[in-house]
Image (cartoon, rainbow, N blue to C red):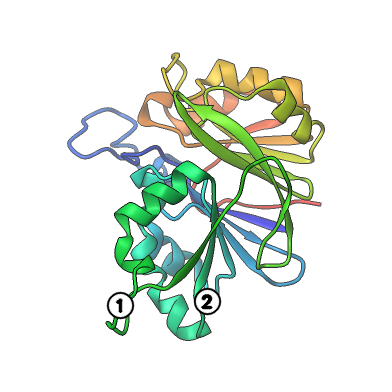
Amino acid sequence: MRLTFLGTGTSQGVPVIACTCHVCHSQDPHDKHLRTSALIETEKGKNILIDIGPDFREQMLRAQVTHLDSILITHAHRDHVGGLDDIRPFNWTQRQKMDIYCNHEARLAIERDYHYIFSPHEFPGLPEANIHEISGDEPVLVSAGEEVIPIKAMHKDLPVLGFRINQLAYITDANFISDTELNKIKNVDTLVLNALRKQKHFSHFCLPEAIEIIERVKPRMAYLTHVSHEMGLYAVTEKELPENVHLAYDGLQIEVD
């Protein structure tokens, strides 16, 4: 199974519009972050997307993705669902609706904000999707043919979902995960976890908090995503991390057993 980091940045991306900081003006491609999203290529040749933010079109073209089987949504903030309208080319080429999986809160928000997708219409060319609500309490078999174990977490006051597929766990935009949910991902091969910056934040894990979670889960390898320009330069921060922890960057591909 292969994971491609399509985007690894926070809601504003990096560089941030109008920012004059040294990170936003860095020429290192590791310091350029589109909004957070990831693509999982399964052993069966299926593609599973995690989150579909406003950079979705650019990410699909850059990664040369030609088919998409399932979309997992962590939560419905705009930087994670803002590209939903651009599923239309996949609707056309695959001749079917797109299957989307999310929790109750995300379903309500998506059906409200993209009502034209889910309401009866006579306009050819509009996006088409089936939205599947998952509780987070039971594994779900997605249309790509993989069993997905939801991981419940909190993003301040908003319930969000992370996902475990085989030996990969992916969690973003969290600032609290209960012991019960952490037990679902203990000793996974690879953990992807959000770390916004080095200083504490009210709704995201900061770097020390993310490292603490990683130490409790004990994955073989961990990657940090949803980073802001306040994390500092990649070349500096990467050297400060534990041996089995790395800053993710756009375009990074990893193999997961």
Q: Amino acid at mark 1?
A: His
Position of residue 153 measured from the top left corner of the image (x, y, whole percent): 58, 30
89, above or below 115, in the image: below
The residue sitting at 42% across, 40% down in the picture is: 9
Query: According to the image, label 2 marks what residue?
Result: 66
Q: SS at mark 1?
A: loop
Is 34 positioned to the left or the right of 41 in the image? left
146, above or below 173, in the image: below
Q: Residues within 10 Å of mark 1 (few under 14, many from 20)?
A: few
Eye-nearest disc, 1 or 2: 1
Q: Which mark is residue 253?
A: none
The residue sitting at 50% across, 85% down in the picture is: 95
Q: Residue 83 or 119: which is nearer the viewer?
A: 119
Q: Is residue 31 in sight in this rendering?
A: yes
Position of residue 34 measured from the top left corner of the image (x, y, whole percent): 39, 48
Q: Residue 88 or 210: which is nearer the viewer?
A: 88
- Mark 1 and 2 residues: CB-CB less than 8 Å, in contact? no
Position of residue 196 measured from the top left corner of the image (x, y, whole percent): 45, 27
Q: Amino acid at mark 2?
A: Thr
Q: Residues within 10 Å of mark 2 (few under 14, many from 20)?
A: few
Is 86 positioned to the left or the right of 235 in the image? left
The residue sitting at 48% across, 85% down in the picture is: 93
Q: Which mark is residue 121?
A: 1
Position of residue 214 measured from the top left corner of the image (x, y, whole percent): 69, 25
The residue sitting at 78% across, 27% down in the picture is: 218
